[in-house]
């Protein structure tokens, strides 16, 4: 194995270790603050009920503002709308047009739901793809179609619920759905070859962007990694020494800032922008989904899309 290949292999191992470690421990401080805030609000509610006296009938009906319906104080109204799986914004009839940036390329996208049909079209210089989702009572059928040629080809049946299918096939692909960060259950002690200091901050402010009234959520993660110890351990593991001082410097400090604009009335993500400092952070930023929505309406014109497969020729 050449020295260059050895160096590349070690750097990839280090990058994986850094990501595994920092993903585990960075959110604990924020989680503790949110738990503390939740307890404070809960105590105040209980104290208020104790002072006013409890009316069992009102509590049963849910008319009392101090009833058991508890709102997470860490979430804004727009975030709560965005995270509502029972009534997501894309369950309504809508039309969205956007540009989707990922991996250095830009894609044009249009999505429209009218009744029990979702039309999904994306294109760039390499070509275009049109998909029709037909929502049934038990399954969702997916077809590859051509509006110009009036042909349709059956792709597959989805047995999952509509929320899951839309997220997996459209929403998560372009980053237009806001989701809470998934917790990692991995034990940090299992991957302690590289020690990392992780600082997370979250800021929320109101901002009007491209005609949309938004809440702008700013997630910033700063990671300072002690990679020298990890390099020594890996060099001992592989049985050779390499001068990695210059390569290590690019891994010692990382900053990633995720800016997310949530449309306040619906909870839809209308823009994402990721900024980074550091070589590893830059590679992660290139993989980030960065949509920019130009149109979002909940009164779409049904004539713009096929609302059924009537008049289409089914091909194999």
Image (cartoon, rainbow, N blue to C red):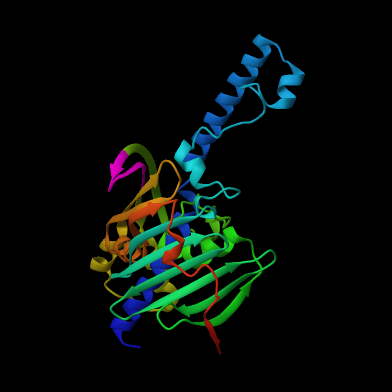
Where is 77 relative to 275, above or below? above
Query: What is the quadrant of residue 266 in the picture?
Result: top left
Residue sitting at 65 percent across and 21 percent down? 64
- Which quadrant does the N terminus fall into? bottom left
Total marks drawn?
0
Residue 208 belongs to the span the image colors magenta: yes
Location of the C terminus by quadrant is bottom right
Residue depicted at 37% across the width and 66% down the height: 109
Q: Is residue 282 magenta?
A: no
256 w.r.t. 232: above or below: above
Residue 18: give x, y in percent of width and height. 41, 61
Residue 14 image offset from top left, x and y in percent: 39, 67
Report the span colored magenta: 207-221
Horizontally, is 51 left or right of 202 in the view? right
Image coordinates of residue 148 in percent, x first then y, are 40, 80
Q: Is residue 197 visible?
A: yes
With 16 as the anchor, is 205 left or right in this view? left
């Amino acid at each position: 194995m050449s020295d260059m290949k050895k160096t590349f292999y070690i750097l990839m191992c280090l990058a994986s270790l850094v990501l595994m470690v920092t993903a585990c421990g960075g959110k604990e401080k924020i989680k503790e603050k949110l738990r503390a805030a939740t307890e404070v609000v809960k105590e105040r509610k209980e104290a208020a009920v104790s002072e006013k006296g409890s009316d069992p009938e009102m509590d049963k009906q849910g008319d009392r503002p101090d009833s058991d319906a508890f709102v997470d104080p860490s979430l804004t109204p727009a975030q709560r709308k965005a995270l509502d799986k029972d009534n997501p914004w894309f369950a309504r009839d809508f039309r969205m047009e956007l540009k989707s940036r990922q991996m250095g390329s830009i894609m044009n996208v249009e999505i429209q739901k009218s009744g029990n049909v979702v039309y999904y079209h994306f294109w760039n210089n390499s070509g275009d793809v049109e998909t029709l989702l037909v929502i049934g009572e038990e399954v969702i059928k997916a077809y590859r179609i051509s509006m110009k040629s009036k042909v349709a080809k059956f792709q597959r049946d989805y047995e999952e619920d509509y929320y899951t299918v839309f997220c997996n096939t459209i929403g998560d692909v372009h980053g237009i759905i806001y989701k809470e960060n998934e917790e990692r259950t991995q034990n940090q002690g299992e991957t302690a070859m590289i020690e990392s200091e992780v600082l997370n901050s979250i800021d929320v402010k109101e901002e009007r962007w491209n005609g949309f009234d938004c809440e702008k959520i700013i997630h910033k993660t700063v990671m300072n990694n002690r990679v020298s110890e990890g390099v020594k351990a890996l060099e001992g593991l592989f049985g050779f020494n390499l001068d990695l001082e210059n390569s290590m410097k690019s891994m010692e400090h990382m900053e990633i800032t995720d800016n997310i604009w949530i449309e306040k009335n619906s909870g839809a993500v209308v823009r994402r922008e990721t900024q980074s400092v550091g070589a590893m952070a830059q590679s992660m930023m290139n993989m980030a989904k960065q949509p920019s929505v130009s149109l979002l309406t909940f009164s779409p014109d049904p004539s713009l899309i096929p609302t059924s497969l009537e008049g289409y020729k089914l091909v194999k």
